[in-house]
Image (cartoon, rainbow, N blue to C red):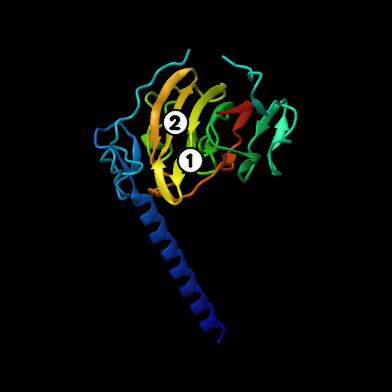
Amino acid sequence: MNRRRTAFAAVIALVVICCLWVASRAIAAELVKARDGSGIFGYKDTPVLPWCGYHVHDPDRPAPPVVTPGSRGRAPSDATVLFDGTDLSKWNASDWKIEDGELIAVSGHLRTKESFGDCQLHLEWQTPDPPIGDWSDRGNNGVMLMGLYEIQIYDSYQTLLYPDGQAASVYGQTPPLVNACRPPGQWQSYDIIFFAPVFEGDRLVKPAYITMLHNGLLVHHNQEIYGPTGHRNIPPYRGPVGPGPLGLMSHNNPVRFRNIWIRPL
């Protein structure tokens, strides 16, 4: 009887191992490299973006040209300072921590207590040096406008992630005009002008738009946001949508932040 039980347990363990191996192979098979030999990887089994003809996270989408950025700004007098290096009183409770006047991502998302719509946002961020993690979480974070529209934070310095997932992209939708990313360990800045979508009841009257500078370089100019952002999909607009919290997304990578302020417009 014991021999039968042992043999049965061994068979079950073998089946489980085989299933896990097949699943891992299927997941790995989803990632493909660009046809031009650049080494950029992404997905080709995702929906096609109707406004440009590329797949979501398409490795064959033209990558933004690399531009070396040319300094730290202070909040204007009419801005709401969200983080000045001393406390997190403007944010909901989280396990993020403050160290040497800098905010460090730990786990979970950090969201403001106050909600915002149209706004001007400034923040500074830094990815770890040396980099931590694999390609999927190399400095991975994000700015969530109204809690719905993600502007990607990522170590895009000499990395090969799909263009609409690089730093300063409207995630899964639109790459930046240029790759202005500095090397890991150097401070970087985002300056964002955001206009929220306009609804009449449930009907979308005007989509959201963004203009943005990354390290002082223009990366989006009056760029339409085509709906809430997502991974490997194209979520549609659903209204009505009012002002929402500003969020910082953590993917368990210790990205640092400082000098965060916002001006409602």
Q: CA distance from mark 2 to mark 1?
A: 10 Å
Residue at the outermost front position: 200
Where residue 145 sits in the image (x, y, percent)? 53, 38
Where residue 229 sits in the image (x, y, percent)? 44, 44
248 lies left or right of 198: right
SS at circle 1: strand
SS at circle 2: strand
Quadrant assignment, res 20: bottom left
Given the image, on which type of amino acid does mark 2 rest? Ile
159 lies left or right of 254: left
Where residue 71 sits in the image (x, y, percent)? 56, 14
Give the residue displayed 62% in from the left and 27% down from the top.
260
Name the residue tied to disc 2: 210
Give the residue displayed 51% in from the left and 46% down from the top.
241
Q: Is residue 102 above or below residue 19?
A: above
Residue at the outermost top position: 70
45 lies left or right of 156: left
The reply to whether discs 2 and 1 touch (Cβ–Cβ < 8 Å) is yes
Give the residue displayed 44% in from the left and 30% down from the top.
210
- Residue 228 visible from this viewpoint: no
Name the residue tied to disc 1: 149
